[in-house]
Image (cartoon, helix red, strand yellow):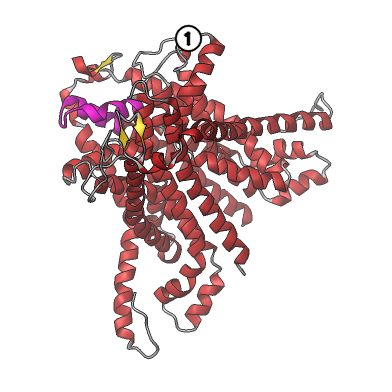
Amino acid sequence: MTRTKPPRLSRQTSQRIAFALITLAAIVVVAPIFFIVGYIVYQGISAISWEFLTAYPHNGMKEGGLLPAIVGTLWLTLGTAVVAVPIGIGAAIYLSEYAKDNALTRAIRVAIINLAGIPSVVYGLFGLGLFVIFLNFGTSILAGSLTLGIMTLPVIISTAEEALRAVPQSFRLVSVSLGGTRWQTIRRVVLPQALPGIITGVILGLERAAGETAPILFTVAAFFLPRLPKSIFDQTMALPYHLFVISTQVPGMPIHIQYGTALVLLIFVLSMNVLATLIRNHYRKQRFW
Amino acid sequence: MTDQHEGQPKRSLSWVEFLIERAIQVSGISAIILVVLIFLFLIKEGTPAFMEVPLSGLFATRWYPIEGYYGLLPLIMGSLIVTIGAAVVSLPLGLATAIFIAEIAPDWVRNILKPFVEVLAGIPSVVIGFIGMLVFAPLIRVTLDIPTGLTAFTGVLLLAWMALPTVVSVAEDVLDAVPKTYRDAGLALGMTRWQVIWRIVLPAGRSGVLMALMLGVGRAIGETMTVMMVTGNAARMPVGLRDFFMPVRTMTATIAAEMGEVAHGSPHYHVLFAVGLTLFVITFAVNIAAASVVFRQVKRAERMLA
């Protein structure tokens, strides 16, 4: 590591070159984000209309709107929340407030890291094997939501635990010294303080689930369905899968409809992202600790 | 949750509390239960493949399930090429971006940049695949003058870019974790800021950089929709460097493209689960390795404090 010979370039010159290269790299990373979002808006905006958002697709999906796909994605996002939020927050409370530093806790942490690393398409296989076939839910919103929910769990656990741990220990001590039990302390003191952070994490987790395609391929997604799902045992169309279908499986698809669909999906997930950021910034300012 | 009023007997309260605390404990171990459950299901559905197709058939170079050829080598090679390529591209870029955000950029640039990297993490992979297919692949075809833009190379560039949020955020944490006293010591000795970064901060955080690399690899090998849309999906055995600019097919794309059409319980179905099992084992190993780096790092920090 240590160099005895003085470098050939002057120290200031080498710093200037290094910083220029690093800045260039950062631009290479960030510029395509502007480009992709901007280009999709530019190409897709002409397709957006009231009809595009509220009509059923017709004429082999080449005309009409996205209604069943939008409604399907809303269902799936809601279903994911129902599955992942209670378990995720419960696990976060356990890790932050109850868990001792022992082998079980370490095993839980390793399991969470692994859960976060499993490829999304493998979640799809698991959902197919367990929910669709073994438990006989069929290709349904129920099977899809359970699959997406399990996939989202590690995101929610990690962010919620971080939010809970950020609450100062003194708050807990005060509550306990006033005679509060452990659960009262969590329920009345820790959770309210950590809530904004938890909500932010939940939204970011759901954002990811809403944009996923691979886990829903075999568990819920329908190629084309000219009606809305009536129950959680129905199949449904979904925005990400619909974009995949019209861009790869349907020849002669009008290009502006493809970009319009990509734009609607992008707006759907990025508005969740913005919402999470706003909530975080708002409460960070209000926080008095 | 019932509201507890003052003077209410404590017993009914502890009753509710008992149930809630049990529920919390069960949620706590849910992650372990789920990992085990996923593993067991992949084994249950995947291992029959090894009975139905001889090992020599699985470790062959031809993947053509319709005629009963289940050679996995082209798929494994496809995944390897794309993943290693993506890791090689995304590590320096991600590290540089992290250094820029953490050490060089003024505050206002940092406050704009960080949310943008988060936006990148939020763009669905199907959207990146879509743009890759429509805009990026034609660009590569024309620039390199090759027959198709749907190649391993295209996949590598897009995957590298998609793995960046992971690499950047981990690398940033690593740089932040290097104590300020280290930097101050370097500056006090008259080093430039760049010398401090290059000779002190990066070496001090190298195990974390290794972790960023591994998590990036884990992210890239599991990516499905983008690779399926931009790498052309030809299950050919890559033999030379030239194949880098030809279509390939990865393990993830194979599962995604074929699972919808196979009969439940057929050899093809079991082989696809075996591919999923392989992916699970690979990501499991990568993540365990990354986690052990973290744990070791904590121990080292404790030792230094003692």
Q: Residue furthest bottom?
A: B7
Secondary-structure class at tag 1: helix
The residue closer to the viewer here, B67 or A92, is B67
Image coordinates of residue B172 in percent, x first then y, are 61, 44
Residue nearest the viewer, comparing A43 with B291: A43
Give coordinates of residue B101: x percent, y percent: 66, 42
- From the image, tell me which residue sits under label 1: B242
Residue A163 drawn above or below residue A271:
below
Q: Quadrant of the N terminus of chain A?
A: top right
Residue A42 vertical position relative to residue A196 in the rendered view, above or below: above
| Chain part drawn in magenta | B251-277
Q: Which residue: 32% across, 46% down? A: B35
Residue at position x 37%, y 30% in the image: A244
- Can you say whether B238 is above or below A131 in the image? above
In the picture, which quadrant includes the C terminus of chain A?
bottom right
Q: Magenta stretch mostly in which secondary structure?
A: helix
Q: Which residue is depicted at the point 62% across and 32% down?
A: A31
Chain of the residue that carries numbered disc 1 in the rendered image: B
Q: Is residue B174 visible?
A: no
Residue A37 percent across, percent down from the top left: 54, 35
Q: Say above or below: A64 vs A176.
A: above
Residue B171 % position (x, y):
59, 41
Q: Which residue does the image show at 66% across and 48% down from the upper left?
A: B111
Q: Amino acid at mark 1?
A: Arg
Q: Residues within 10 Å of mark 1 (few under 14, many from 20)?
A: few
Q: Is residue B252 covered in magenta?
A: yes
